[in-house]
Image (cartoon, grey):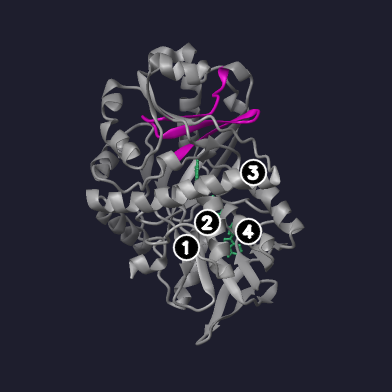
Amino acid sequence: MQVLILGSGVIGTTIAYYLAKAGHEVTVLDRQRAPGLETSYANAGEVSPGYSAPWAGPGVPLKAVKWLLMRHSPLVIKPMLDPAMWRWGIALLCNCTHARYELNKGRMVRLAEYSRDCLQQLRADTGIRYDERALGTLQLFRTQKQLDGTGKDIEILKAYGVPYQLLDREGCVRHEPALAAVRNKFVGGLRLPGDETGDCFKFTQGLAQLAEAAGARFRFGVGITDIAHDASGVTAVHTDAGPFRAERYVMALGSYSPKLLKPLGIRLPVYPVKGFSITLPISDAAMAPASTVMDETFKVAVTRLGERIRVGGTAQLSGYDLRLDGRRRHTLEHVVTDLFPQGGKVEGAEFWTGLRPMTPDGTPVLGATTVAKLLLATGHGTLGWTMAAGTGRVMADLIGGRKPEIDLEGLGLARYA
Ligand SMILES: Cc1cc2nc3c(=O)[nH]c(=O)nc-3n(C[C@H](O)[C@H](O)[C@H](O)COP(=O)(O)OP(=O)(O)OC[C@H]3O[C@@H](n4cnc5c(N)ncnc54)[C@H](O)[C@@H]3O)c2cc1C
């Protein structure tokens, strides 16, 4: 089957790989000069099925008010006259009940755990390297109140069979020895030993090469302008390099997906949630993190990626604005210098921003649309790297006419109908 994939972020590229391996004729279009140069470029590096949960949960509206008042706030809202933003915000608030949280989390965990298994298999099959580590992740608590408040999270982890360790200060230091130097700054942590870490951009680049070796074609520097359709479904994808046609079309345009779907009458509730990261070279390996340390107070993740430290966080609602904001950099620098003061030098860090393609229920949107031949693989929000391999497998199975290995209940566009 001829398949045209729109977008070569981690999602589009992973789908291309699985489809090409299954013998399909695959072409991938992207406006950038290489794969993975937008949101998949410098994320926090966590492959974290253990933390797969929607942002919308009970108590979040109250917490949000508190966060907005913090100096190093994890949440920033730039009020705008953007109806899409307000619609999305209200839909997110509607998902903050216990019942919705349970439902959404269950759907996310289903895909994330499958994805971790697919990633491990993919690694075994291909030998792909991406500064990966399988050393778990550690949520670090600075206050006793945070540590005492883990009860509900632990209940959920138990309910989903996710292995965990509740650690005191010395327990944290055992897994993250560099924290010994700042042991007075935290009281304990929650460790998820099944989580992994790795560089999403390196993975995307490496997998694109493997997809090409399997026959996929990547066309870079191609801006997609619109999707033509008639009663039979999609007839062509128009670009600044001319029209492209195929038997199936997969949209994996991340935060930009709703813009191209709107003219087709498809309303996709994905909104860009801006995040930031800095990447710094390690100056003393013994004083750097071993894996990911997630600072619960600032909601900032500090991750070891080979010889570098990646520090990522912040959720900012400000539309498609990609400007770098020095105040956000300051927050990231504050966390890494506070926890790993001798780990790396922040002066030489690369500062980056990306737009998480977020749905109000946290769950991505996979599968068919109301327009024939057009499928979606988007809306992965905070967890696109975690869910990429599973998404690739599911989409390749759907297009190849095979039954996906996981139940797709609640993962499609129909849930918004
Ligand atoms: C600060 C931050 C930290 C994060 N940390 C983590 C983490 O630790 N773990 C995790 O699992 N996830 C994390 N994420 C989320 C993850 O990075 C995203 O979910 C994922 O990268 C989304 O991938 P994607 O392929 O859908 O989108 P993208 O990577 O944005 O890919 C979309 C592609 O479409 C192309 N495109 C868009 N419009 C057009 C057009 N009109 N014409 C042609 N091409 C177009 C773009 O060039 C781009 O290459 C984080 C995100 C941020 C911002």
Quickly name the residue at label 1. 366
Nearer-N-terminus badge (1/2): 1
Amino acid identity at mark 4: Tyr
Quickly name the residue at label 3. 123
- Residue 402 position, x and y percent, is 54, 67
In contact (CB < 8 Å): disc 1 and disc 2: yes
SS type, badge 3:
helix
Residue at image x 58%, y 42%?
A: 42
Nearer-N-terminus badge (4/2): 4
Question: Is 210 placed left or right of 358 in the picture?
Answer: right
Nearer to us: label 2 or label 3? 3
Residue at image x 65%, y 77%?
A: 245
Kindly indicate the quadrant of the structure image that contains residue 183.
Answer: top left
Residue 308 covered by magenta stretch: yes
Amino acid identity at mark 3: Arg
For mark 2, does the 10 Å Cα neighbourhood hold few (<14), some (14 to 19), or many (20 or more) residues?
many
Quickly name the residue at label 4. 18
In contact (CB < 8 Å): disc 3 and disc 4: no
Quickly name the residue at label 2. 391
The residues tagged by marks 3 and 4 sit, at their Cα atoms, a distance apart of 13 Å
> If the image is split into quadrants, where does the C terminus sit?
bottom left
